[in-house]
Image (spheres, grey):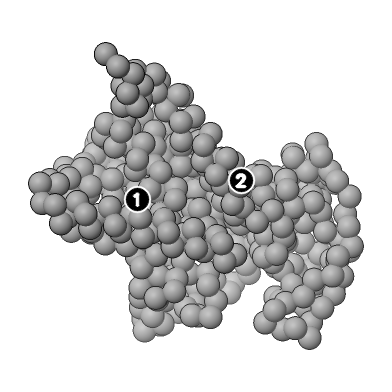
Amino acid sequence: MPLTSSVIFERYIARSRFRFFLSVFVPLTLLYAATASWHLGDFDVLTNAVSAWHLGNTGSPLLPGYEHLAQAPYEGFMGSFMGAPGGTVSKYPPGAAMLAAPLYALTPGELVLADISNAARPEIRTAIPLPPAWPSTLVAVLTTAAAMGILGLTFLMQGSAHQAWFAAWIAALGTSAWSVASDALLMHGPAMLWIALGVYLSSRQSYRGAGLAFGAAVLTRPHTAVIPAALGLGMGASQRSLHPVLRIGLASSLGVLILVLYNGLTFGQWSILGGYGRVFANKLVAPEALGFLRNLFGGLFDPAQGFLVQSPFLLLLVPGLLPAWRKTDPWVRGAAIGGLVYLLLQFKMNRYNPANATLYRYPLEALIASAPLWFAAYLYWLRGLWGRPHWRLMFKLTVLMAVGLQGIAIWLL
């Protein structure tokens, strides 16, 4: 038999989960690395890098030398820094910075004084010590590529090796996983990695490991806690057993406890809110239905940053979600419910601003959690339409359109 690409794939790659993972992770890492920014231009990225450098080199979240960034007129315009009982700290949960901290500890580099400014407020300029950008960017590249590789393994639990491999690459290049998460160290890449690992381990009924992965996600983005809650309850209900609920719940609660401990020692607030204070909590409970619908509609359909506009192939899968729901496994449904609740929370706590191109990255964690259901929609619905040439052509065109849009976004950034 001639060694065609399909034969090589089935003979050497599909027979080993590790080789399958590497077939996604390695080339994707190279591509992400080639297209990443490798600088600290975004202020959220700058905040995470500064925090990671200090965690790695001092073992402390305190950030001496950045005190003025937590005060007017710089506060909110030059990163996310705030005053705390011990000094100036990052407002963000520690998960993303903790991943980059060991690399900064091994290759500390020098803090270099650099001038920074805000394009929206050109009159505001200052000088701050900046760490090297490459360790934090490398973590963004590796975590996002690993998340896509693990997502491919999850698809492998549902379909053929070829289907799983191509679906992983569509998710990797046809969404803002490429243009945002892999580009620089925001919270998305690390959170996506832990969610992908948690969902995959849940599919293999490794509930304790799944819970630990979800706990790491909570350390990165606290409201991802709804994903293991929904998945554990869904698995428990389907099996009529408390084992999945307790194992996922207890293991993921370790991340919650560490987060509460970190917030208590850093901010003096023994809660999961930490540096976010009560701003997002107040938005969450505010009875503002119109604003919530505006956020949701803008986040999905804004012409410039709407998630379904930028990844239009998902629109072709929407009609298949219901038949997929009926036929798929309980872990897929539980993860999808958790992803949906997370998405609703995200848009309830944030504000739609067409001038602020951030909404398109908000659904990334929800997409990772719900990706197995989207994949099932392809398997159980859209694939059945392959006999109709126009459906096959439309799906291919929308995938190419999504990849092209992400490539343009990378180029513009």
Left of 94 or right of it: where is 82? right
Q: Is mark 2 on a helix, strand or loop?
A: helix
Residue 129: image location, x then y, percent: 86, 61
In the image, 128 versus 114, the foreground residue is 114
Mark 1 crowd level (few <14, some 14–19, many ≥20, 10 Å Cα): many
User: Residue at the spot x=19%, y=51% of the render?
Assistant: 392
Left of 135 or right of it: where is 293? left
Q: In which quarter of the image is the C terminus?
A: bottom right
In the figure, residue 232 lies in which quadrant?
A: top left
Q: Identify the residue under disc 1.
A: 370
- The answer to whether residue 199 of the structure is visible from this angle is no
Three-letter amino acid code at disc 2?
Answer: Ala
Point out the frontmost of discs 2 and 1. 2
Gap in angstroms between the C-alphas marked 2 and 1: 26 Å
Q: Which mark is residue 206?
A: none
Mark nearer the N terminus (2 vs 1) = 2
